[in-house]
Amino acid sequence: MAGTTNFYGISYPTSTDYVKDGAVAIQTVATGFDSAVAIPTYNAQTGATYTFVLSDTGKTVTASNASASTYTIPPTSSVAWTANTTLEVTNLGAGVVTFAAGAGVTVTNTAQTLAQYQSAALIRTGLNAWTVTPTSGGSSGMTLINATSFSAVSSQSLNNVFTSTYQNYEIRLNITAKSVLGAINFRYRTSGTDNSTANYQQAAIYLRTNNANAGDGAVGATQISSFGTSNGIATSVIAQVFNPQIASVTHTTHQFWGGDAATEFIYLGGSLFNATTAFDGFTLTAASGTITGTVYVYGLAK
């Protein structure tokens, strides 16, 4: 009888006596060909964790979870991966998918994550070595970590959005309503507690209708938006945060446009938290009144 070898999960004859074994050998080749050209199949996953299996080879694993998920690549000692195995993954859920290495496995870029509707190929490059390669999006640029909407609140806190997965972050804030004109302040958080020390130093230039000015100072918070909005006029803020999760000095640059029915306001500024402190979140606070809107946090790939 013919011997066989395995390529990408399909057995093929390696030697055969076509007189004695021809029918079996031809059937094996035909079966392998059918598998190779078949319409791709899917392994739909909805849990918060998943460990890849051998039968995922040749399929697309779909992730669908509203919360963050972790997908683990097990070692060859527990799964008989063949050479050059490729696993395809597509994230259909709102939660970010993170890849993890099993015992003894090395993944060259576990920082590669998948936001919703992004895909990646996991390529086996050695006995227990894998590389994650984005095939659609991925964290090669900005990856959405958190999106939070709020309505008529005096403050809004986000926890656990700064982690070791990313070094730098971008915050996008869209304020659609504010009950009283005034500043929106920004404070860092650690383990669910705001840091209100007087280590926030800031400087800014700003243009207001018929007016231009500049300012600086050291205070207990950063004015991420120094004007505000009323009467349904929006305030839009973009802020870049550098190394917040590391116990070092943290820098922030921010810009916003805002105004009300009578005044328009453009602001360019930067701030420094002048202490070696690590943070995992932040709080937005209205200096007076309440705010309504949405805040987005993105991780920026290195």
Image: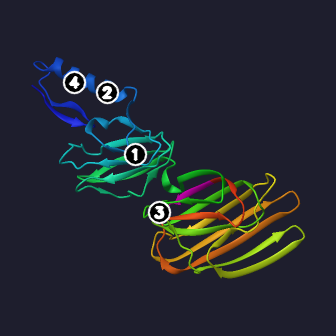
Of the numbered discs in the image, which one, if any, rests on residue 28?
Answer: 4
Q: Residues under labels 4 and 2: Cα distance?
A: 11 Å
> In this figure, which residue is indicated by the disc labeled 3?
166
Q: Are marks 1 and 4 in contact (CB under 8 Å)?
A: no
Question: SS class of the residue under badge 2?
Answer: helix
Q: Earlier in the sequence, mark 4 or mark 3?
A: 4
Using the image, determine if residue 165 lies above or below residue 201: above
Of the numbered discs in the image, which one, if any, rests on residue 121?
Answer: 1
Instruction: Look at label 2 and name its amino acid.
Output: Ser
Q: What predominant SS class does the magenta segment belong to? A: strand
Q: Earlier in the sequence, mark 1 or mark 3?
A: 1
- Foreground label between 1 and 3: 3
Instruction: Look at label 1 and name its amino acid.
Output: Ala
Of the numbered discs in the image, which one, if any, rests on residue 91?
Answer: none
Return the x and y of residue 120 as percentages of the image width and height: 43, 46
Q: Earlier in the sequence, mark 2 or mark 1?
A: 2
Way the structure is coloured: rainbow
